[in-house]
Every structure is written in structure tokens, then in C-alpha cells.
Amino acid sequence: MAIQQPPQLERALQSAADRKASELFLLPDEPISFRVKGAIVRGDGDALSEADIRAIATAAVGEERLATLGEAGTIVTSCSLVGVIDGQMTIATSRGQLALVVRLITVKTLPLETIQLPPPVLRAIESPAGGLAIFTGRVGSGKTTTMLSVLDHINATAEKHICTVEDPIEIRLTPKRSLVTQRELGLDVPDFITGIAASLRQDADIILVGELRSPDAVQACVQAASVGRTVITQLHATTPQKAIERLYDVQPPDQLPIFRRHLSETLRVICAQVLLPHATQPTRAPAYGVLIPDAEMRAAILAGADVSIRERPLPEGSLAISDDIERLRREGAVTDEAARAALDSLL
């Protein structure tokens, strides 16, 4: 069922956009409210009834899915005012009544030169052989923006079929030279596995999986990469080596040896990221760690060894994130204090 947006929700989203709000609150017995610059601001309208909120929630996810709320605890879906604002709606209950909160998405795609993405990352992703590309970093590190910016760059420069499987959709991509199919968990498919399978059956060249959460999803991504698709995804880890360790940790012990073999064959690139406050501009400077595996690294993955322990220098295109942070400090883009804090955050 596609999301339906009653006029009341669309007016609320427009008001949120006008106020530059970060959240929109639709709570029982309260007027439509907003979070603006960290503070709660109540709107001027009448208080919402439970019936008002239920009508919006039912239109958004359908009666059948809404009936699962008691078991699930929360339901998350996307909403938008096309060309104006995107949001992630969380449906929950408060004292037995429905309550909706919409996080207004500030993620947007940016030119790759703006985010200063190391060129080897894009070259690895654009390999005609396909493979697995992982973006990693802590929450707020900018990895989602970087991942989606890479995807939209491909959308603008190549004739591909791009499929995404997200929970929920982060940003709606406008088809350019590529065809774009976006699927949302709970709305279009029940889980990542089904979404990945649908993308393969519909001849996707590139599959974006919003986030790796389960062993089955990880294995499905690796399997899709093994048949020549480019699979782009993300997880929470501070360095490429820690990202590999996270992948190992979610695998059942009896399946780990074969998983390591498949990962060693399909891994194309891991790009870790951290954002540092810029020393002279009201913005943040990105530092990257890039792993582009060579034969020695693939052998280390196969053996379950640390890929960062090497006898030879890093392969061409790879970059230690600590070295990139030091480069920013040396160039005066970040302060000594900011560089030290960023290095500490990697531990």
C-alpha cells in the first residue's frame, strides 16, 4: 500500500518546512507542534484529537500494519512534501492513544568534490565487476550523506538501474540518466532480504541497502555482490578493520569460514568517515579511511586476520583515517585539539 497523505499532514509538513523545524509532533490533545533550534514550539491551531491522529496513521501505513503496533511498539515510515521536505514518521502510543513524531530529514546529496571524497572510492564502486562497497562511521559522521551522494552521482552520470532497500527511505532520488526504484521496509517489502531478492529479479545494476543489521541481510548483500551486482551499504564502525570485525561478529560460528571466503572475493571498498569542526569556517571537515583490498588483504580476510597488519605499504588507493586527520591538522583545516578528539573517537 502506498502512503496516503491527508491535507492535514501536508499542511503540517509545510509549516515545519517554513519554520525550519527539525521535528514535527502530532500528539493527542495538543496542537501541531515543532522543534525549532532545539526548543518545542506549539502551533496556533486547535488541539488534535485521537481520531485526527489515527486517520493520518492509517493513511500512512494501512489498517493491517497499524494493527501490529501493539506487538512492534513502534512503526516507522517515510513521508514527504515533494520538492520541499522529507520526513521519517514514527508511530507509537501514549496512554493508549496514537502519537506521531516526524523527524525532518536534512540529508541531501552533495557534489563529490564538496564532500571531498577520495577518488579511489568512486573508482572502486564503478568497477564493472561489481562487488560490495561499505560506508562506515559513528552516528552523525556523515556516512549516509556520502553514500547517497555517491549513488546520486552515478544516477547523473551512468545508464544504470539503481534499486534501494531502506528503513525508511532517507531521501527520494529523482531519476536522471539512471532508472531508480526505491523500496521501503514495511511499505513495499517486509524485510531487507525480500527487497534485495526483488532487486536482483528486476535486473538491478546497483543495490543500496540502507544499513546492515542482521546476519541474513549481510549474507544477502554478499551473495548479490558475488553475482556481479554493485551493492552499497553502511554500518556503524569507526575504521575499515572494525567494520570487517562487525561483519564477522554477526555471523553464526559455523557459517563464518564460508562467509569470510565470500567476503574476500566480493569486497570492493570500505570507506570510513569522521567529521571534524573546521578551524576557520562554520562547517565541518571530513576525514576518510579507505580500504581497497589487494591480494594480501583478501588473504587476511580469508584467514580471519587483521587486514591492517601488513609487511608492505597500504595498496594504491587505500588511506589510513589517522593519516587523513593528520593531513587536515597539518593544512590548518582543523585544530590540534579537534584532531586529537577525532583520533580518540576511533578507539
Image (cartoon, rainbow, N blue to C red):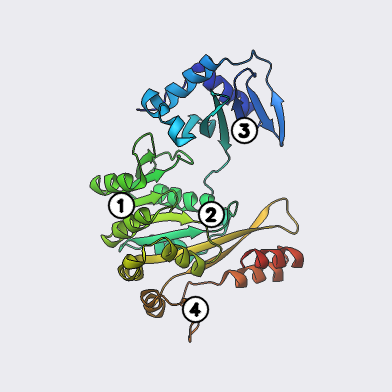
Distance (Cα) linking label 4 and label 2: 23 Å
Disc 2: which residue: 143
Amino acid type of the residue tagged 1 in the rendering: Asp
* In the foreground, 241 or 201: 241
Question: Local crowd at mark 4 within 10 Å, few (<14), some, or many (≥20)?
Answer: many
Secondary structure beneath disc 1? loop
Q: Do the residues labelled 1 and 3 touch (CB within 8 Å)?
A: no
Lower position in the chain sequence, tag 4 or tag 2: 2
The x and y percentages for residue 172 are 45, 38
Given residues 264 and 325, the one toward you in this image is 264
Mark 4–mark 3 distance (CA, rounded to whole Å) = 44 Å
Q: Which of marks 3 and 2 is in front?
A: 3
Whether residues under marks 1 and 4 lie with C-beta atoms below 8 angstroms apart, the answer is no
The answer to whether 91 is drawn above or below residue 283 in the figure is: above
Q: How crowded is mark 2: few (under 14 residues within 10 Å), some or many (20 or more)?
A: many
Q: Which mark is residue 23?
A: 3
Where, by quadrant of the figure, is residue 34 drawn? top right
Q: What residue type is labelled 2?
A: Lys
The vertical placement of 233 against 101, above or below, is below
- Badge 4 or badge 3: first in the primary sequence: 3
* Dot 3 crowding, Cα within 10 Å, few <14, some 14–19, many 20+: many
Is residue 82 among the parts visible in the rendering? Answer: no
**Label 1 to label 4, Cα distance in Å?**
30 Å
Q: Is the residue 114 above or below the residue 179 in the image?
A: below
The residue to which callout 1 is attached is 205
| Disc 4 to disc 2: CB gap under 8 Å | no
Q: Where is residue 310 in the image (x, y as percent from the top left)?
A: 48, 83
Tell me if residue 345 can be seen: yes
**Residue type, label 3:** Glu
Q: Residue 314 carries which label?
A: 4
